[in-house]
Amino acid sequence: MARVSSLLSFSLTLLIFFDGYAAQQGQEGQQFPNECQLDQLNALEPSHVLKSEAGRIEVWDHHAPQLRCSGVSFARYIIESKGLYLPSFFNTAKLSFVAKGRGLMGKVIPGCAETFQDSSEFQPRGGEQFEGQGEEGQGQGERQRFRDMHQKVEHIRSGDTIATTPGVAQWFYNDGQQPLVIVSVFDLASHQNQLDRNPRPFYLAGNNPQGQVWLQGREQQPQKNIFNGFGPEVIAQALKIDLKTAQQLQNQEDNRGNIVRVEGPFGVIRPPLRGQRPQEEEKEEGRHGRHGNGLEETICSARSTDNLDDPSRADVYKPQLGYISTLNSYDLPILRFIRLSALRGSIRQNAMVLPQWNANANAILYVTDGEAQIQIVNDNGNRVFDGQVTQGQLIAIPQGFSVVKRATSNRFQWVEFKTNANAQINTLAGRTSVLRGLPLEVITNGFQISPKEARRVKFNTLETTLTHSSGPASYERPRVAEA
């Protein structure tokens, strides 16, 4: 009898579990109806703009069907000269691309030591004390020195692609004369995101008077930094500072936004610009390889940046047509942890990227310069997009959807973020295409064409990725047999 009772109890538990799971699935279905039934795609523009003292943040609506299906969000950061994007972290991994300009970037990785130390000592301002300087040391102020130290700071420039794991605080500074433009894709569907499918920026400094536009329904609520939520006395005790300074950390009266202007010099410790010591750089590259850093690859020392605008590292290069460079976890091992990769393309007018599809990833295409005609075909064989895309627009290309790109301006440049650390493509035309891999008999019978036509279909295109686009081919109308 006890055994029967146990079986009944176990069965009831299973019934409740599956009923709850089915209800949860039903709720998700109601929350995201027809999430990936994409019968029409559109080139998207930003839906919200967050203005700050020294720049702005432009946010795309990640509830748009094509972004929701891809499981990503997208943002563009425009930082003016001497603008500082204040440190923040996200609940998701992100991959960023420097579209224009140059600057500095710093990241604070949890648990990692400060590896940048100031070699030039400087004296504290009058009356200031630092750890280790007590009352007895006040008379020795002239001999006391203080050195700053912090985690790694990097120079960034146009073409750099930057990987950032969840929870890592990151800041940017524009030390150039032109705006620094950075675009970022956020992987909302990753298992590393333990919250909902919304990007959530956590700001360590500054306040955003315009509110949290990343989340629907919270636009009216100003977004404040993390310190603002704690009592000032708690901050004072934790940091061993006075109450007034603790209140300043909360930025309660600060309405400059998340990008502020730096007055005077920006004195952080940073290495010299790339290219200032070419002999040393070449020596290091020869010793460790082009992508080595000479250190054990821990999360603290792992490289997180690579440049895709250097034609010397291109995977496909044709002087008369353009080039394509890819970045995956083989090039940048940290991408294994964030489930994202990137592709950079630059083609001339009348060049075409042969029709292809992503075998194991969704792609987010962002136009950095120029214009192109793009066609995208879905699983029903229907054309879901056929139009021009221009600078500043983006379009999602779902997994398996075939796409062709043709430049219509002097130069068309774009970056694609892909939701797989090792995204793979397959082509419909060219030397490594699916048609090239099929037997002639399959092509002949599958398309009801002659063996001669099948050979043309299979062998006429010798390129693998890039070819000339000379306009539509002439079409010969089939002859009708005379009665």
Image (spheres, rainbow, N blue to C red):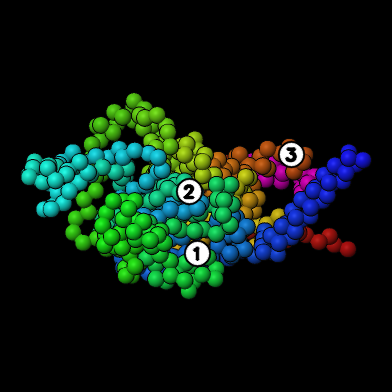
Give the labeled residue for mark 2: 166
Give the labeled residue for mark 3: 440
Callout 2, which amino acid? Pro
* Screen quadrant of the N terminus: top right
Give the labeled residue for mark 1: 214
Q: Earlier in the sequence, mark 2 or mark 1?
A: 2
Along the line of sight, the residue nearer the viewer: 343 or 72? 72
Callout 3, which amino acid? Leu
**Residue 446 shown in magenta:** yes
Q: Which image quadrant for residue 116?
A: top left
Q: Relative to 119, is 103 on the left or the right? A: right
Mark 3 neighbour class, 10 Å CA radius: few under 14, some 14 to 19, many 20 or more: some
Mark 1 neighbour class, 10 Å CA radius: few under 14, some 14 to 19, many 20 or more: some
Q: Which element type, helix, strand or loop, lies under badge 2?
A: loop
Q: CA distance from mark 2 to mark 3?
A: 50 Å
Q: Relative to 272, is 356 on the left or the right? A: right
Q: x, y percentage for residue 152?
A: 32, 42
Magenta stretch: helix, strand or loop mostly: helix
Check the image and report above or below for 210 versus 137: below
Q: x, y percentage for residue 31?
A: 67, 64
Q: x, y percentage for residue 367?
A: 47, 59
Callout 1, which amino acid? Trp
Residue at 34%, 38% in the rendered image: 113
Along the line of sight, the residue nearer the viewer: 358 or 109? 109
Q: Which image quadrant for residue 421?
A: top right
Check the image and report above or below for 119 versus 51: above
* Screen quadrant of the C terminus: bottom right
- Magenta range: 444-460
Residue at 60%, 55% in the rendered image: 70
Q: Which element type, helix, strand or loop, lies under badge 3?
A: helix
State the residue lying farthest toward the bottom.
220
Q: Relative to 386, is 178 on the left or the right? A: left
